[in-house]
Each structure stands twice: as C-alpha cells, then as structure tokens.
Amino acid sequence: MIHSVDRRSFLRISALTGAFMGIPNLISASETADVDQIIDRLAQTPAATGKSVIGLTVPPVKQVRVGIIGLGARGSFHTMTVAALCPEKAKIVAICDIRETSVDNMLNALKEKGQKPEVYKGSADSWKQMVARDDLDLIFVCTPWELHAPMAVESMRRGKHVAVEVPAAITLDECWALVNTAEETQRNCMILENCCYGDEELWILNMVRAGVFGTITYGEAAYIHRLRRMLFGYDYYNQWRIRHNLAHDGNLYPTHGLGPLAQYMDIQRGDRFEYLVSQSSIQATLSEFSKTVSPDNEFYNRTDFKHGDMNTCLIKTAKGRMIHLYHDVVTPRPYSRKNSLAGTQAYHEGYPSRLCLGESDEQWIPEAEYQTFRTKYGHPIWDRLKSEIAKNNGHGGMDFVEIYRLIDNLNRGVQLDMDVYDAASWSVVTPLSEISVELGAVPVKFPDFTRGRWKEVRELQILID
Ligand SMILES: NC(=O)c1ccc[n+]([C@@H]2O[C@H](COP(=O)([O-])OP(=O)(O)OC[C@H]3O[C@@H](n4cnc5c(N)ncnc54)[C@H](O)[C@@H]3O)[C@@H](O)[C@H]2O)c1
C-alpha cells in the first residue's frame, strides 16, 4: 500500500515525528517520502550501544536499599508496601517529591514504621541529587508520565536498578532510551505492571502454559475506567493527566490489560507485536464534563481536548495472533480490563471471570467446575503470601505481590519478572497508536527492541519459582 505525501500529510507526519515522537530528523523538509517509508523508518532498529539484558541477573542484594521519586497516590502507596518488607528484605534510604508537604507527610508515616529516610524536596530537580547517592540499589519512579523515562535513564546511568510506573515511556525515542541505557549500564528496568500479578491473571498464565487453552489465537484487553472527575480534579499533581488528553489522541494507558495478555502470548519470548492499527471515536465527554467544573478550573468549558472518548487498537503478532485493545477513561460504564483470551481448547472472559472449555456446549462452565480449575491452576504465590496480602491489599493484593516479587528476586539474585524489553514494547503502543489515528488507521510497525532475540523461547521468572 503506497500513499504519496501531499502537503497535509507531510505536515501531519512532521508534527508527529518532531513533537510527539521526538525524532526531528526523521524527515527533512526537502524529502519526498511516502507514508509507508516513514512508518517503516520508525520501526528500524538503531545500532546497539550495549549488551542485551535478556536474562539479566545481578548478585543477590540481601537488603535492597530503596529510593522513591514521586510521593503522590501511587508512590506513597508503594513506599508503605516497601516499608512492610523492611528491615528484613529492604530499607528505605531516601524519598523525594517536588512538593514539600508530600515528603513531610511520608516521612512521618515512615517514622512510625521505623524507617528514617533522607529527604529530597522542593525543586523539580531534587531527584537528581537523590539518584546520585552511592548507597541506593533501586529507584522507584512514580511521577507523571512525561517524567518516567528521563528519571529512569538518569537513575540507571547512576548505577541503580529502576522500577518504573506505567507506562514506562510515552515516545518512541524514550522507549529506545530505556532499552539502550539498560544495555549500556546492565541495570534492571522493570515496568511496574501490577496487573501481571493478579490472582486471575496468574491463574490464566498457568493454564496457558499447562495447555488448557490449546493454541492461543486472540485476546482482548482494556483500560476502561471512568476517571473524568479525577481528571478535572486536583488529586493529580498540577492536573498532569488531563493535559495528555488535551494534547494526544491514541491509547494513553495501554499496559494494564496488555501486559498480562503479552505474557499469555509469550511476547518477547517467542512471539512479538508486529504492527497495529488504531482508531478513536469523537471526543465528547470531556468537553461536556468541562462545563460542569468550577469556572476557575483551567479546564473549565473547553472544547479542545484531542483524545477521543474511546480508542481501539488492533495488534497483530509475528505468529499471527491478534489483540483488540481498548482505552476509555470517560464513559459512564463499569470498570474493565477485559482479560479475554481465546485458544483452540478454551476461552476466558473477565469482568466477571468466566471460562468456556472445548466441548462445553457454548456455555460457561458451572461454578463448581470453575472453582476446581481455580484451585488446580492457581499460582502458589497467592497462597504463600496470603497473610501479608491480607494486611497489604491494594488493588485486591496484586500490588503487594508485585513489590514482594521485585524485592525478593533482587534478594535472591534471580531475574526480575519483567524486563526493559517488556517495558518498551508494551509502552510504545501509545506513540504508535497516535500515529495510526493521526494518519487514518494506517498500519504502524512495532520496533523490535530485542534486536532479533524475541524468537528465543524463554520462561517468565514468575513461572520458574
Ligand atoms: N499501576 C497502577 O495501578 C497505578 C495506579 C495509579 C497510578 N499509577 C501510575 O503512577 C504514576 C503516578 O500517578 P499518581 O496517581 O500517583 O499521580 P500523583 O499526581 O498523585 O503523583 C505524582 C507525584 O509526582 C510528584 N512529582 C511531580 N514532578 C516531580 C518532580 N520533578 N520530582 C519529584 N516529584 C515530582 C508530584 O508532586 C506527585 O506527588 C503515574 O505514572 C500513573 O500512571 C499506576
């Protein structure tokens, strides 16, 4: 399929590559390239600047010395979860936030838990001093999206492992920066995709590997969560999240549903995302809702939100599997990450979780049989950590399992459950979907962040121990 570049397309591509993608030299003003060529160029693999971190292990870290950047809703939650693992498995050495009160409140809460970290606060760059310390092993990045990659890259350059909130990066350049920096520094860069640790998700993963689904053919994933009141409110620092909805149309938050599906499908471990096409609906809810907020709200009575109410992506994998991915944070409808998975022998649908098996007559299996499957294929970690999960039950317990695994794997010197290639290939859906939407649902290829090594069949660490 060849499209010639008229002036309008040229301007649209230039805007994408320059402003959003961060690749100013991708197309020069004198060049007459076609859209396909430009999109192909986006998927090209730059020369490696380091050594692959596939299978990276580091010597055991008996007590992981932690620094945390961003003490808002998520970062303060993670801080208290790490505190629950102190002092046996971890120590909170330093905390940082641009807002002094957030740091002071966290310091008080930590003192009650016997942790007395150093504090960094008050300026947008305070975190740089913190990550330069030589007594830290691991940095958590829990700030607004646009700060994730710069903070993670600098932390790795300063010799630290990083755990980055979702999405790990928001431009193609940033995805490559994470990969290249991890390879140059041989540091771990784990995306904090807590949904990969859900009881239901780990159960499905176990069933997939045990062959219950037969050959995996397709799946559906989503982030459907009505956040419109929060988007306009002041819970998010400087209303950072709605600014992304103002400026971008695509899937802004792809990984909660996609991460588990990618693991079911062996993405980066035998298969890979090959290309996507994306479309968005009209934008209507944000502008209608904006009329209802206070006139002194910066987003009062605006009609210039770019993000359509619903964004959908269709992703094709190298092995021909298909994923239908949804993103809707405004419509009044129930929360869902879909969590649907189809195979030749079984089909699962989430919200609520139901299972249909080969010859079960197009019906969901009855509750008693479903429970038998839950027991037979449930991941043992949920049983093993039962009492701790009961005390630290954020998002139903999966947040605790996530942080426990991160710290415990470092304690034992084994691979982390997710690596920088997962972080990049899941997060890059955001810029690729924006390009596809902008250019009229054209197919956009994924870069191969593993530089060819996705073909190697590797088991996830969470299924090894
Ligand atoms: N995995 C999940 O389930 C989940 C849930 C909620 C949020 N998140 C992610 O966590 C991240 C944070 O979200 P949130 O809801 O906590 O937002 P938030 O606005 O509550 O917190 C962000 C924090 O970053 C701080 N910050 C901003 N600029 C800074 C800087 N230069 N230096 C230091 N601190 C700075 C802010 O003061 C604020 O405390 C986002 O990436 C979000 O997507 C993930």
Image: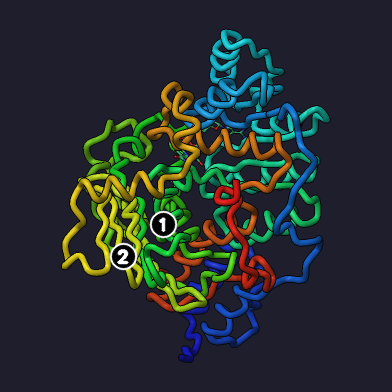
Reply above or below: 465 against 219.
above
Q: Which residue is mark 1?
A: 207
Residue 282, how many percent across, how many down? 27, 62
Q: Is residue 101 visible?
A: yes
Q: Which residue is mark 2?
A: 346
Q: Nearer the viewer, residue 186 or 14?
A: 186
Residue 309, how many percent across, how many down? 29, 55
Residue lying furthest top in this view? 112
267 sits left or right of 125 in the view: left
- Answer few, some or many: residues within 10 Å of disc 2's Cα (few below 14, many 20 plus, some between 14 and 19): many
Q: Is residue 11 visible?
A: no
Label 1 to label 2, Cα distance in Å? 10 Å
Amino acid type shown at disc 2: Ala
Residue that appears at 57% across and 49% down? 168
Residue that appears at 36% across and 39% down? 231
Does the Cβ of the disc 2 residue fall within 8 Å of ligand 1? no
Tell whether label 2 touches label 1 (CB within 8 Å).
yes
Q: Quadrant of residue 65?
A: top right
Question: Disc number at residue 441?
Answer: none
Q: How is the image coloured?
A: rainbow
Residue 380, how many percent across, how many down? 48, 40
Q: Quadrant of residue 465?
A: top right
> For the residue labelled by badge 2, is the local secondary structure a helix, a strand or a loop?
strand
Residue that appears at 64% across and 61% down? 173
